[in-house]
Amino acid sequence: MGEITKDTTIGDVLKIKPNAVPLLMEIGMHCIGCPASMGETVEEAAMVHGIDADDLVTQMNAIAD
């Protein structure tokens, strides 16, 4: 459908790769449904959760649509 980058918002990640939800939950992003997180970029979310954004992007893009 589309490629995820560090600038992709969490809201768009959920549209592009709904199968990424278990990965996000596993790494501690439990508030993926919060209104604030919908506008947060992958890079911002990774920073808040102490995760390498590049690794996260790679992992999400590897998930089947």
Image (tube, helix red, strand yellow):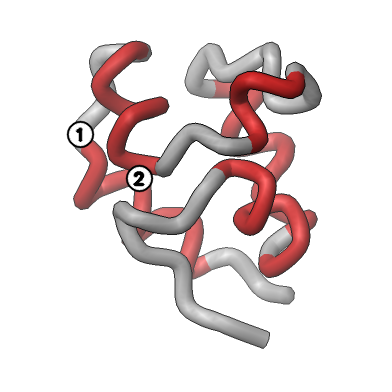
Q: CA distance from mark 2 to mark 1?
A: 6 Å
Check the image and report above or below for 56 versus 64. above
Picture disc at residue 52: 1
Callout 1 secondary element: loop
| Quarter-of-image position of residue 37 | top right
What amino acid is found at the position of numbered circle 1 in the picture?
Asp
Question: Going 57% across and 82% down the picture, which residue do you hit?
Answer: 2
Q: Is 33 displayed left or right of 63 in the figure?
A: right
Which residue is labeled 2 in the image? Answer: 56
What amino acid is found at the position of numbered circle 2 in the picture?
Leu
Q: Is 21 displayed left or right of 58 in the figure?
A: right
Mark 1, Cα crowd under 10 Å, few <14 / some 14-19 / many 20+, is few
Q: Are marks 2 and 1 in contact (CB under 8 Å)?
A: yes
Question: Going 67% across and 86% down the picture, which residue do you hit?
Answer: 1
Question: Going 67% across and 13% down the picture, which residue do you hit?
Answer: 30
Mark 2, Cα crowd under 10 Å, few <14 / some 14-19 / many 20+, is many
